[in-house]
Structures are given as structure tokens and as C-alpha cells.
């Protein structure tokens, strides 16, 4: 994992350096052109920065690999952005993605479940197939990812219970029409460099909180062994008034943070254990392992879980 992080960081630095060199080259050409046209070198406009019109977002290529009966989604690098077992297309293959469903320990199926960052659509497909009472939505900026999810990862087309929004997650959470309407919100927003979530400001997390219902839960995919983890946990705690914890790191290096909105939670562990067993029996998700991780992370091991 460390090797991959270093590689991704190097790729990102190279990309930024290339952009900087390009801008500097354009500015040099602009100044040379001005001098050739007889403009005074002391003119305060001579060294003005080059201003370009806004451009459409630049996306990394969407690529795929297969190994051991599992198809993987990539954004042009070795980083795995999603996965699907070919014989179990509606099963959530990756452990961290399974943990993103840990809000089920605390909530009955809400009316609205939203995923920010579609990826291989594992969470979206699972919720659409098994959480029949929920309106399931995904937000994805890159249209190629949406096409890949539908053609390579068996995401159904939109219907009365499923909607994929091709828009920016920032715009989505800041749209007042979404505020106070989402029971469970799952955030997995990474780019090709995979150095941490591409949206991780306090303002973003406050907008996320505003989208939740009176008793809402958000799960966020983070990297445990990376500087972005501490930064994100600090900002999540600020946005959610300290009502945040993170499950233990899984073998892929991911850590899923869980944040709560609404009234304080005080639920006996006996109740959570029964709930975990129900989730395992009905949805085949490792909920008792989540509960064990919750106890390990929070230090709350007996009586009730409070947050």
C-alpha cells in the first residue's frame, strides 16, 4: 500500500509540474509577443497572468482488469476503484465497500439512500436490489464511469427506485432541495491518484450533514495509512460535532468513517448484536465483524453504545 501511495503521489506531482510548465510557457510566449509589438516592458499589464476560459473537467481513462473471477475498475492506474465477482454481480466484493453499509446497524431502511461516487456501482446495485423500501441514488461526475457501471458491472438503468445523477457531488450536497432528505449517505469520491477523497473540506462535510434527515448516518471511505486520514477525521469531527468514529483498517488499507446526525444514540450492545445477526441472515453482510470493529475503535465494549 505504501508503495502504491508513493507511486500515486509521484504521478500527481508529475501531472502538476507538467501543468505548471505549460502555463509558464504560455506566459513567456505572451510576454514575447507583447515586446515584439512594441509594448513598453514596464507596462504593468506585461506580466499579467494568462487567464483562460473555464474548461470541462479532465478525467483519467476508465480501464478494467480481471483476475480470479473478479472484474476490477481502474482510472488508468493500478488503484482499484471498484470490483465485481462475475458469478455474483450483486454481491459486494470488497471488504471496505461492505463496511460502507454499516449504517444498517443503526437505521431501518430509510426512504432515500445516496452514494457519492459511483465506481463499479457495488453499493448502488446492492441497495437497489435488497433495500426495497428505499429510493436509491448515485452521484457521479464522469459520464464514462456511468457507462462502465452499466455495461461492465451490470448496473440497471434508471427506474422508479433508481436514479444516477451525472453531476458534481459538491453541487449535489449544496443543493437545498436535498437538505434534510437523505437517511443514509455513502461517500467514496476518489480520482486516479487515489491520494484521499477529492472533496474533504469542513464546508463539504457540513453540506453533507445538512442533507441528512433528523436521524441520518453517513459512511466515508478513507485511507488509514495516509496523511489524508487524520485531516479528514479532524474535519468530520468539526462538521459533526465529534459524533464520528472509524472502523479498523482492512487489508486494502481503507478505513471507513461513520458520522451521525440527529439525536444522541444510546443503544444496548445486546440490541446491536441482534441487529447484526439479522443483517447477516438476511443480507449476508459481515455485520458482527462491524460491531466488533466498532467496539475496538471506540473502546465501548459493554452496556450501551453511545455517540
Image (cartoon, grey):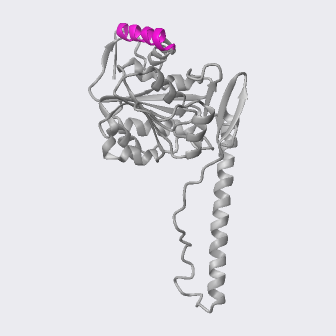
The structure residue drawn at horizontal position 54% and vertical position 87%, both measured from the top left corner, is 43
Q: Percent x, y for residue 192?
A: 62, 44
Q: Is residue 34 above or below residue 28?
A: below
Q: Residue furthest right?
A: 67
Q: Is residue 23 left or right of residue 167?
A: right
The structure residue drawn at horizontal position 41% and vertical position 30%, both measured from the top left corner, is 161
Q: Percent x, y for residue 16?
A: 63, 56
Position of the N terminus, as image quadrant, is top right
The structure residue drawn at horizontal position 39% and vertical position 35%, both measured from the top left corner, is 237
Q: Which residues are magenta?
A: 269-284
Q: Percent x, y for residue 3?
A: 70, 36
Q: Give the overall secondary structure of the magenta segment.
A: helix
Q: Is residue 168 above or below residue 184?
A: below
Whether the magenta-drawn stretch holds residue 282 is answered as yes
Position of the C terminus, as image quadrant, is top left
Q: Is residue 65 visible?
A: yes
Q: Residue furthest bottom?
A: 38
Q: Percent x, y for residue 256?
A: 50, 28
The structure residue drawn at horizontal position 63% and vertical position 90%, both measured from the top left corner, is 37
Whether the magenta-drawn stretch holds residue 83 is answered as no
Q: Is residue 69 above or below residue 45?
A: above
Q: Is residue 248 left or right of residue 304?
A: right
Q: How many marks?
A: 0
In front of the other: 255 or 211: 211
Residue 18 picture quarter: bottom right
In front of the other: 287 or 6: 287
Q: Is residue 252 visible?
A: no
Q: Is residue 107 left or right of residue 201?
A: left
Residue 103 picture quarter: top left
In front of the other: 213 or 48: 213
Amino acid at each position: 500500500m505504501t508503495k502504491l501511495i508513493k507511486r500515486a503521489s509521484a504521478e500527481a506531482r508529475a501531472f502538476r509540474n507538467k501543468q505548471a510548465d505549460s502555463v509558464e510557457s504560455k506566459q513567456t510566449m505572451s510576454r514575447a509577443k507583447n515586446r515584439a509589438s512594441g509594448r513598453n516592458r514596464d507596462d504593468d499589464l506585461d506580466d499579467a497572468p494568462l487567464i483562460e476560459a473555464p474548461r470541462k473537467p479532465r478525467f483519467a481513462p476508465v480501464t478494467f482488469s480481471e483476475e480470479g473471477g473478479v472484474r476490477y475498475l481502474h482510472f488508468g492506474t493500478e488503484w482499484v476503484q471498484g470490483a465485481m465477482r462475475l458469478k455474483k454481480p450483486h454481491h459486494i466484493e470488497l471488504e471496505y465497500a461492505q463496511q460502507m453499509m454499516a449504517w444498517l446497524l443503526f437505521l431501518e431502511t430509510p426512504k432515500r439512500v445516496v452514494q457519492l461516487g459511483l465506481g463499479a456501482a457495488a453499493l448502488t446495485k446492492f441497495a437497489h436490489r435488497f433495500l426495497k423500501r428505499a429510493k436509491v441514488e448515485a452521484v457521479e461526475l464522469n459520464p464514462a464511469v456511468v457507462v462502465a457501471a452499466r455495461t461492465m458491472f451490470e448496473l440497471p438503468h434508471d427506474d422508479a427506485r433508481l436514479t444516477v445523477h451525472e453531476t458534481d457531488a459538491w453541487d449535489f450536497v449544496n443543493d437545498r432541495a436535498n437538505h434534510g432528505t437523505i437517511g443514509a449517505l455513502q461517500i467514496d469520491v476518489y480520482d486516479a491518484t487515489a491520494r484521499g477523497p477529492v472533496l474533504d473540506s469542513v464546508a463539504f462535510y457540513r453540506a453533507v450533514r445538512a442533507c441528512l434527515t433528523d436521524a441520518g448516518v453517513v459512511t466515508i471511505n478513507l485511507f488509514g495509512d495516509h496523511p489524508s486520514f487524520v485531516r479528514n477525521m479532524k474535519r468530520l469531527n468539526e462538521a459533526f460535532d465529534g459524533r464520528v468514529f472509524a472502523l479498523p483498517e482492512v487489508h486494502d488499507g481503507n478505513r471507513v468513517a461513520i458520522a451521525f446526525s440527529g439525536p444522541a444514540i444510546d443503544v444496548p450492545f445486546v440490541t446491536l448484536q441482534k441487529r447484526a445477526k439479522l443483517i447477516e441472515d438476511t443480507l449476508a453482510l459481515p455485520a458482527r465483524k462491524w460491531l466488533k470493529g466498532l467496539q475496538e475503535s471506540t473502546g465501548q465494549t459493554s452496556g450501551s453504545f453511545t455517540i
